[in-house]
Image (cartoon, rainbow, N blue to C red):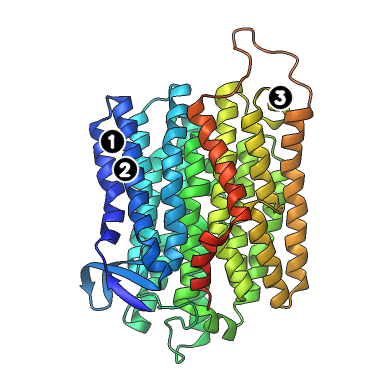
Amino acid sequence: METVADPRLLLAVVIPLIGAGLIMLAGKRPNLREGVSFVTAAALFGTVVSLVPGVLGGTTYTWTLFELLPGLSFTLRADALSMVFAVTASFLWIVTVFYAAGYMRGLREHAQTRFATCFALALFGAVGCAFSDNLLTLYLFYEIVSITTYPLVAHHQDREGYSGARKYLAYLTATAKGLVLPAMVLLYVLNGNLDFAHNATDGVLSEGVHRGIVTGLYIAFLIGFAKNGLMPLHQWLPGAMVAPTPVSALLHAVAVVKVGVFATVRVMLYVFGTETMAGLNLGLPTAWFVSVTIIVASIIALGKDDLKARLAFSTVSQLAYIVLGVALLTPYGIAGGIIHIANHAFAKITLFFCAGAIYVAAHQKKISRMGGLGRVMPWTFGAFAIASLSMIGVPGVAGFITKWHLLLGSWDAGSIGLILVLLTSTVLNAAYFGPVVYHAFFGRPEAVQDAAEPPAREASMLMVVPLVLTAVLSVLIGIFPGFFMQFVQLVLP
């Protein structure tokens, strides 16, 4: 495997930062502001995609900006795992630019320039995490994501918004500073550096380190990267639902939670490695630990009548699939976990796009009040149905690829219990998504409607086209999973 220094890594990280500045300058001209957002997102995606052929050819790209201390540098790196996250996030930013324009204008939201600026800054942090070559770089960008998304969560600037944003920031910064940072310091003392390993097998810790210390470090990282949404440190995630729907889509599909699970996966595979995890018996206990999140979050989702709240707990459950797959330490399991970074992103962003379109067009948040809306909003609820099938894991949609690999991985790990967990979660997925779709298409419409409100209809094309596109892509990824699976195969030990 060849390692090449390439300034395109720095360019990919800097593009959103420059874009954020230009968005601020264009703030008083909405069309120019949104044009700048689109060009920035497209430029980022183009830069990321330009790295694809080399990475698939076995090249690892790096770029060092500076060194703080021996073994502590600010270095970027693009490898196969990076590309799964970076390609997904950069592409979905393009789609979200159009959707957000339709949503924010449709509701005549205030502070749209601040919103677009912070959105770009959040992608700056997310891409930085994707292309981090060591724990120091990853940690810095992880914190940037937390800080830059705070104004997005508190966007409405009311009591509920500030409360949700405070909880959001408190959970994420407290766990990062209280667990991840001390673990990094100890790892540096033990190793003399914070670099990631070059493959997913070996890890970076020497055999002479006491197994109790290694286990403690592992637990600190697993829990400390609380953006991964694992229970019991998941409460920030449903609390952040007070934000506008494009922010929820960003939080749940593109940037924040994916930064959390990406960081978790990166540490599991490239700090500890599969051999160390297997030797210390860390794999299956982790899988069982996250299984609690998968089942409990799904049960909670069943009882939520607010659509975004139901989707929030669905996210908590679905993120745990990624950690579970890697914790299985089998090729099928690891493949299922990593591919779900992309599969979940396309389906979940579709679901949140649909929730926003429903609110803008019909002013409804409660599932119980969406009876018959599918008949007047067929494109929106059709896309919602497709994305729901992906979350459930029906063949022909992206989520099936995830669950098939996880089931095979659980079988290879010899755990019938985890197979039952996955099957139970699939039934629960169907139980909380199915009624939404059924009620929308076959339920009785609300008998009383405010005469001042226009009848429900599809939202603007700026919103409907993106949600249909991401739904279609979920199907295409389910039928032709080869693009992302190429990267996954390069990661496998």
Q: Is residue 225 visible?
A: no
Return the x and y of residue 270 as percentages of the image width and height: 45, 75
Which residue is painted at 53% across and 74% down in the image? 492
Q: Which mark sits nearer the N-terminus, 1 or 2?
A: 1
Most foreground residue, 251 or 398: 398
* Quarter location, residue 151: top left
Residue 40, disc? 2
* Three-letter code for the amino acid on which mark 2 is drawn: Thr
* Quarter location, residue 193: bottom left
Which residue is painted at 63% across and 37% down in the image? 383
Q: Which residue is mark 3?
A: 375
Packing grade of label 1 (10 A; few <14, some 14-19, many >=20) is: many
Q: Residue furthest bottom?
A: 208
| 378 up-or-down from 178: above or below | above
Most foreground residue, 43 or 308: 43
Report how far apart the C-alphas of labels 1 and 2 lie in the structure: 9 Å
Q: Is residue 186 visible?
A: yes
Return the x and y of residue 354 as percentages of the image width and height: 59, 34
299 on left or right of 257 = right
| 102 up-or-down from 19: above or below | above
Q: Which residue is mark 1?
A: 23
Return the x and y of residue 110 as percentages of the image width and height: 39, 25
Report how far apart the C-alphas of labels 1 and 3 lie in the structure: 38 Å
**In which quadrant is the N terminus drawn?**
bottom left
Packing grade of label 3 (10 A; few <14, some 14-19, many >=20) is: some
Q: Which mark sits nearer the N-terminus, 1 or 3?
A: 1
* Three-letter code for the amino acid on which mark 1 is drawn: Ile
Could you tell me if the residues under marks 1 and 2 are in contact, i.e. CB atoms within 8 Å? yes
Q: Secondary structure at mark 1?
A: helix
Which residue is painted at 76% across and 60% down in the image? 423
Report how far apart the C-alphas of labels 2 and 3 lie in the structure: 37 Å
